[in-house]
């Protein structure tokens, strides 16, 4: 019987026991903190290490790399630990990175006291990820922001810009 080694094979890989310098241990944010900041300010505080990343980011090994109003970019390195039984990275990895970037593109437009949730997202897989792919970027951009509904789109690409998946997302916006 062969046993797989789940050691990260890329120097940019993030593991729960080895957080990058300046990254706080992951934790959900208290509602009081969420209410007092705009979405963009909250996301920028996470990037600056003033607020912790969400636990899912460390579990799957990705972090917010860039954020502006209507734009959110996450990066991660697919690992053997993300594999499904048929020999490639599980589609849930693609989906989680794309959901994160598309939702945070909407999040970056929220005023203090506003919240949101994903209503639906659609994903198209173009090619498989493997532990040899290297660092990937999930780039989310706002398409439309109304008072109650927002839409966004996302692309998952490698360092050379090769497309692995793309999608769209609809979010509901509400007062907290």
Image: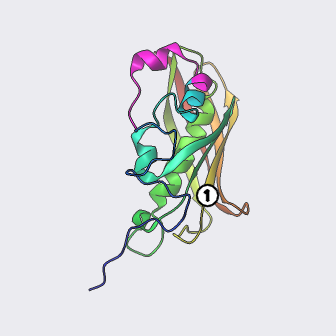
Element marked by disc 1: strand
What residue range appears in magenta? 26-41
| Residue where numbered disc 1 is placed | 136
Residue visible at 38% across and 34% down in the picture: 27
Which of these two is toward me, 127 or 48? 48
Whether residue 169 is visible here, answered yes or no, is no
- Examine the image and state in which quarter residue 63 appears: top right
- Examine the image and state in which quarter residue 108 appears: top right
In the rendered image, residue 129, in percent from the top left (x then y), is placed at 55, 67
Instruction: Give the total of numbered labels.
Output: 1
Which of these two is toward me, 48 or 167? 48
Residue visible at 57% across and 35% down in the picture: 47
Q: Is residue 15 left or right of residue 136?
A: left
Residue found at the far left of this picture = 1
Dot 1 alpha-carbon crowd within 10 angstroms: few under 14, some 14 to 19, many 20 or more = many
Q: Is residue 10 left or right of residue 83?
A: right
User: Does the stretch in magenta take in 34?
Assistant: yes
As displayed, is residue 82 above or below residue 146? below
In the rendered image, residue 95, in percent from the top left (x then y), is placed at 51, 52
Whether residue 140 is visible here, answered yes or no, is yes
Residue visible at 42% across and 44% down in the picture: 56
């Amino acid at each position: 019987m062969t046993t797989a080694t789940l050691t990260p094979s890329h120097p940019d890989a993030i593991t729960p026991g080895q957080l990058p310098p300046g990254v706080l241990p992951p934790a959900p944010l208290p509602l009081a903190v969420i209410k007092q900041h705009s979405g963009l300010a909250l996301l920028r505080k996470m990037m600056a290490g003033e607020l912790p990343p969400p636990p899912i980011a460390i579990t799957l090994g990705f972090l917010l790399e860039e954020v502006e109003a209507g734009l959110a970019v996450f990066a991660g390195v697919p690992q053997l630990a993300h594999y499904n039984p048929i020999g490639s990275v599980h589609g849930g990895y693609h989906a989680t990175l794309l959901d994160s970037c598309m939702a945070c593109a909407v999040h970056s437009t929220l005023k203090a006291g506003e919240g949101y949730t994903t209503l639906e997202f659609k994903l198209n897989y173009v090619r498989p990820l493997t532990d040899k792919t290297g660092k990937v970027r999930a780039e989310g951009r706002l398409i439309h922001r109304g008072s109650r509904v927002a839409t966004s789109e996302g692309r998952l690409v490698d360092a050379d810009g090769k497309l692995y998946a793309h999608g769209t997302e609809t979010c509901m916006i509400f007062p907290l």
